[in-house]
Amino acid sequence: MDSVNKLTPQKMFELADTLKNLRDLKQDLEQQVKDINAKIDETDYRLSELMAESETQNFTRSGTMFCLTTKTRASAVAGSKEELYAALRQQGFGELVYETVNANSLSSFVKEQIGENDDTLPDWLTGLVNVFDKTTVGVRKASK
């Protein structure tokens, strides 16, 4: 092993510090994005209200055109997703319904199935899921 890649406690601590700093920075930036998105939503709402009140359909400012638009959005009533899905299928609109499996739930399930099958993937899952191990470093605040 050459000296560049020589593992030392010093190098391990440097990498640990870098990893922690990067994760902290990521968390800070994610919070900043959430805050900015909230400000965007509030500003968009206020501007659209002003434009509607003044009956301004669009205007240009500093080379950017701002247009008042209305989009219809819909979501399932809380607790009635399955009823909505059944109604859509019954009325011939089943292509709107997508089944999904949460990636973390699937990973946990597959790990459990492997554990119950002598540490091998059950035959019925072979060719249906990709299984791989990913080694990472867990980072948490040390207890005092």
Image (cartoon, helix red, strand yellow):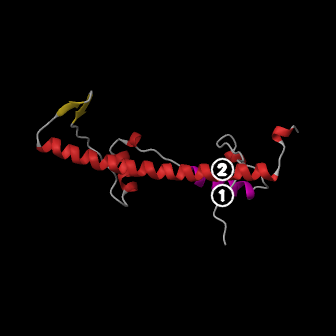
Q: Decide if residue 102 is in sight here.
A: no
Name the residue at 66% across, 70% down.
Answer: 143
Residue pointed to by mark 2: 19
Residue 75 in view here:
yes
Q: Position of residue 106 (x, y in %)?
A: 60, 52
In whole angstroms, how far apart are the C-alphas of marks 1 and 2?
Answer: 8 Å
Q: Does residue 28 appear to the left or right of 120 in the view shown? A: left
For label 1, the SS is loop
Please name whichever residue, 99 or 68, is drawn nearer the observer in this view of the structure.
Answer: 68
66 lies left or right of 105: left
Q: Is residue 64 above or below residue 138?
A: above
Q: How many marks?
A: 2
The single residue placed furthest to the left in the displayed view is 54
What amino acid is at disc 2?
Answer: Leu
Instruction: List the residue tagged with mark 1.
Output: 139
Q: Quadrant of the N terminus?
A: top right
In the rendered image, the vertical position of residue 141 relative to residue 62, given as above or below: below
Magenta segment boundaries in residue numbering: 103-115
Residue 144: percent from the left, percent from the top? 67, 72
Question: Splitting the image into 4 quarters, where does residue 68 fall?
Answer: top left
Instruction: Spot the residue most to the top.
Output: 63
Query: Observer-nearest residue: 69 or 105?
Result: 69
Looking at the picture, which amino acid does disc 1 mark? Val
Residue for point 35% across, 46% down: 88
* Residue in view at x 65 percent, y 50 percent: 19
**Marks 1, 2: nearer the viewer:** 2
Q: Is residue 128 magenta?
A: no
On whether residue 110 falls in the magenta region, the answer is yes
* Residue 36 locus on image (x, y percent): 38, 48
